[in-house]
Image: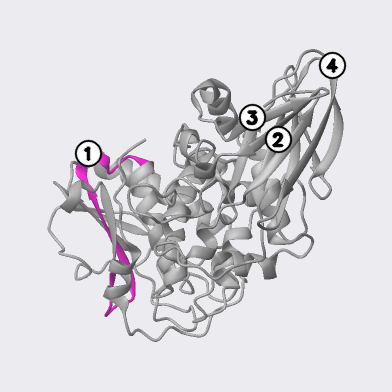
Amino acid sequence: MFSIKQIIFLTVLQAIAGHAAPTPRDATPVQAGAAPPASFTANPNIGPGGSNYKDSPHFRIYGGSSSQQDAAIAMLEGAYTCFVDTLGWRSSGLSYNDAQDDGPWTKVNIYAVGSLSGGAAGVMHSDYATGMSWLEVVTSYVATPGVTIHEYGHGLTYHAKNWVDQSRTGAWWETTANFIAETYKNSNLCAAARAKYNQPTGDTEVNLNKVIGDSFQVIVDGTSGSGNYYEAWPFFTFLTNNLDNYASLGANTLLEMWAQYSKGSNETPLHTLARLSTSITVPKLVGRYWARMAYADIGSAQISSAFQSRRSNINYANLDQTGSSGGTTNYRVKSSRQPRYMGSNIIPLKKSGAVTVNVSVTNTSGAFTATLAIRNTSSGTTRYVELVNGSGSTSVANGEEATLVVANTPNLIQYDPFSLSSDVMKGLNYQVAITGATA
């Protein structure tokens, strides 16, 4: 995985601070109301400009070699086709200042540069006067989607408007940008767009040691040096692929989370999701997400394959044994790994042959969702047994494996991922009794 820049979103906010954003648009794709031209207009005054450039219908690439420019253009045009033309996101060619979404339509400028401060591989900027995003990418990474499409993902988020100047969405911008890069590289949603521009299906950049090994952390944690806000994007993959067929979720989930964000409210994206999700509460949704992450079962073949090859290196040391009696083994969660706000513990179970696994989770510190995830080791199919009030049982066949997942799922909290408060950092202190298997 490339060392993508650790931009603090507030830097971007400073560039557009005080800018009065238009009333938020609904989720209708802008193309329905205003047909864009086949080729947008270039503006060399956005960013430093230059004489070495190459144009495409929606982008202008400054710097780099001709082959690097061609590679970047193919990748970016593929991303534009997928996210704007196919999925209906607001065009990156429309100014942030455009209240009617009727143009003018401007190319996004991308600058290939020798280096960036802090060792960054890329950075997104916004131009106050034009309301346009523009990118700088270190030349050696210009044709790398994990960098360039990540930065373009920031641009798409900026042009969607409603998360701008909202501190509680700040860390989610990195989660979103990595999700966009990942989706472009290997999701079926972008397969036709990749094929149109002869782009290969890429490998996943999922960091399972962080996502699963540190799943106890706040679901999006912006803490410098230890947070997960670059790695938390599988949550969006789970929502987008929607294997559980929850009403109102699916391919348009991120678009709707932008469009339905309460403008100027500084709410968290989870609060927006609560209004969007009509058939399941966000706490229950998060509980199911973590249950599916027990076997990386979120609709991505690349992530699933990565899990199978890397699972032996993941840190699962979440519990301490406290005793056993009559075939039941008792455990308590380690204090350092108590699940924080919307985080979880993923606990593989050991068993011999076909068994009936009984589990009882008890705690005194807050609401939780406990689930047994069961996987057929031959077919790879999974099933999920939610434990009612923390207790339940299921038969686990000889050819199946089981994992207990305990998620901290309280009522929603308004929190800033870059400044975590005590209520979101409070861990779920629980005990668990297991019969038929051990942790």
Instruction: Tell which of 170 and 40 is nearer to you.
Output: 170
Dot 2 and dot 4 residues touching (CB under 8 Å)? no
Name the residue: 42% across, 48% down.
230
Which tag is nearer the camera, tag 2 or tag 1?
2
Name the residue: 18% across, 44% down.
64
Which residue is denoted by mark 2 in the rendering?
404
Dot 4 and dot 1 residues touching (CB under 8 Å)? no
Which residue is denoted by mark 4 in the rendering?
354
Of callouts 4 and 1, the N-terminal one:
1
Of callouts 3 and 4, the N-terminal one:
3
| Distance in Å between CA atoms under marks 4 and 1 | 53 Å
Dot 3 and dot 2 residues touching (CB under 8 Å)? no
Q: How many discs appear?
A: 4
Of callouts 3 and 2, the N-terminal one:
3
Q: Name the spot of residue 325 as percent of width and height, x first.
A: 79, 25
| Distance in Å between CA atoms under marks 2 and 4 | 17 Å
**Residue flagged by tag 3: what amino acid is it?**
Gln
Q: Which residues fall within the magenta stretch? A: 126-145
**Residue flagged by tag 1: what amino acid is it?**
Ser
**Residue flagged by tag 4: what amino acid is it?**
Ala
The secondary element bearing badge 2 is classed as: strand
| Distance in Å between CA atoms under marks 3 and 4 | 23 Å
Name the residue: 65% across, 48% down.
407
Which residue is denoted by mark 1 in the rendering?
140
